[in-house]
Image: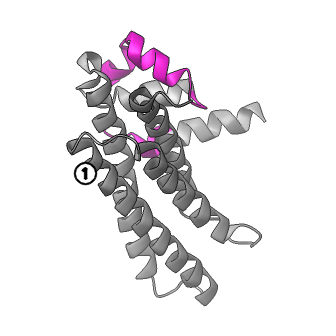
């Protein structure tokens, strides 16, 4: 089981954070980043994700909200692009195409929720942020579920896991504004 988690973390970081520099990894997390990441399911992934953005070392809660939702948005839109490419694959089976169409709808919902979160951040309306991040995570879960119980491996498994983890960071950051646990 530990080996599985190591492999999953490796792939998450490799595929989700391709723009990350080695300097970002060596940074000691700020008190705020440490507080946030200690509340997520994967501390290392959280720190590495947040520090993939150069604004993080000097960021306050408001800026970290933009960073975290931005990372989730980039993942969701990249996944949408991957789904579109996979749907154009004429060699895919009808069953695979059906599953990918489910994922296409799910990621449309995820991107819409994350766009709404940005609008809420811009208008300093914070009470729906956690709910919107939860919608993005649920979309990733639903997409992944479309491939469960089949002999087909989800070609989006890594991206789904990454969006779910990034959405988890967004949820924790959102709680900084609402005080809800």
Q: Looking at the picture, does residue 150 appear above or below residue 97?
A: above
- Viewer-side residue, 153 vs 91: 153
Q: Is residue 81 left or right of residue 147?
A: left
Which residue is drawn at the image coordinates 39% and 16% (left, top)?
32
Where is residue 16 shown, x and y percent of the image?
43, 44
Q: Is residue 29 visible?
A: no
Q: Looking at the picture, does residue 133 appear above or below residue 97?
A: above
Q: The magenta stretch spans which residues? A: 13-42
The magenta stretch spans residue 124: no
Where is residue 1 shown, x and y percent of the image?
78, 36
- Viewer-side residue, 75 vs 115: 115
Which residue is drawn at the image coordinates 53% and 61% (left, top)?
139
Q: Which residue is mark 1?
A: 119
Which residue is drawn at the image coordinates 54% and 83% (left, top)?
97
Which residue is drawn at the image coordinates 60% and 64% (left, top)?
142
Where is residue 7 shown, x and y percent of the image?
63, 38
Q: Secondary structure at mark 1?
A: helix
């Amino acid at each position: 089981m530990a080996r599985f988690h190591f492999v999953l973390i490796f792939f998450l970081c490799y595929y989700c954070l391709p723009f990350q520099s080695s300097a970002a990894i060596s940074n000691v997390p700020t008190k705020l980043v440490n507080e946030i990441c200690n509340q997520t399911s994967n501390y290392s992934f959280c720190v590495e994700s947040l520090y993939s953005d150069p604004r993080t070392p000097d960021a306050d809660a408001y800026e970290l909200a933009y960073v975290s939702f931005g990372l989730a948005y980039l993942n969701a839109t990249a996944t949408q692009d991957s789904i579109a490419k996979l749907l154009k694959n004429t060699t895919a089976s009808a069953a695979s195409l059906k599953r990918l169409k489910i994922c296409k709808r799910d990621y449309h919902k995820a991107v819409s929720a994350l766009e709404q979160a940005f609008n809420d951040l811009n208008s300093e309306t914070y009470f729906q942020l956690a709910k919107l991040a939860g919608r993005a995570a649920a979309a990733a879960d639903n997409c992944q579920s479309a491939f469960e119980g089949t002999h087909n491996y989800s070609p989006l498994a890594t991206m789904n896991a990454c969006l779910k983890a990034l959405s988890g960071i967004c949820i924790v950051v959102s709680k900084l504004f609402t005080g809800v646990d």
